[in-house]
Amino acid sequence: MMLVMSNSARHGLRNAVITMAGCMTALLAMMSLSAAGLGALLHAFPAVFDALRLGGAAYLAYLGVRSWCAPVQALAPGSPRPTHSAAQPAALYRQGLLVAASNPKAILFAAAFFPQFINPDLPNVPQFVILLATFSVIEVSWYFVYAASGAKLSVYLQRAAVMKAFNRLTGGVFVGFAALMAMVRE
């Protein structure tokens, strides 16, 4: 959510949607893997879960440091913040994909949560599709809430000092999440 809001504030709502697409791709893939039994595998082999968790923490820390150190420049009021490169959409998608994929807890969440709503007397696949679609609608709705908040913040990010403080805040939050992810063991 923080990544979507941050990218919306920095690059606009349209580019935040690209980040959302990357996040949702990873989440849907992880939920599908959970349905296929990967959640049980991660639960049975804690070392695999720990490796994924620590890799995710390292990636979040990398994003945090990168945000903290990002260069800033003041803009004239009302002028759009420039894009960083022609390949930006692919980079934003990849960033969303990697952030979401770096959290193996989504697989365990699906493995613990979804079975409660599956009727064993009915075909599993249609039930899973309904659960996944419901999850997607809720998740995307929250992404849009955070993206809209980020878009509103962008008005205040025209001044270099404010943008630098925003970069430091979001970078610190990412590093904090990385530390929490690295320390939590369950």
Image (cartoon, rainbow, N blue to C red):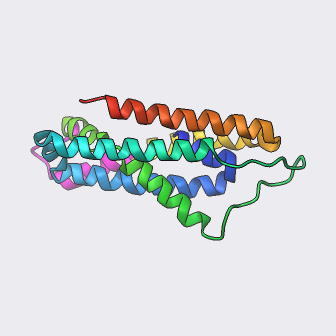
Q: Left or right? Give the position of 176 relative to 34.
A: right
Measured from the top left, where is residue 56 in percent x and y? 37, 45
Q: Left or right? Give the position of 146 relative to 110.
A: right
- Of all residues shown, which one is farthest toward the right? 76
- Residue closest to the eye, 101 or 85: 85
Start-end of magenta stretch: 117-135
Most common SS among magenta residues: helix
Residue in the image at 45% along x and 41% along y: 138
Q: Left or right? Give the position of 50 relative to 97.
A: left
Can residue 5 be seen here?
Answer: yes
Q: Quadrant of residue 87?
A: bottom right
- Of all residues shown, which one is farthest toward the bottom? 86
Q: Quadrant of residue 161?
A: top right
Measured from the top left, where is residue 158 in percent x and y? 81, 44
Q: Left or right? Give the position of 111 relative to 96.
A: left
Say if 93 sits above or below 73 in the image. Answer: below
Q: Is residue 118 magenta?
A: yes
Residue in the image at 19% along x and 46% along y: 48
Residue in the image at 56% along x and 33% along y: 172
- Residue closest to the eye, 34 or 42: 42
Total count of labels: 0
Measured from the top left, where is residue 102 in percent x and y? 36, 48
Measured from the top left, where is residue 109 in percent x and y? 27, 37
Can residue 106 be seen here?
Answer: no
Q: Is residue 139 magenta?
A: no
Say if 88 sits above or below 183 in the image. Answer: below
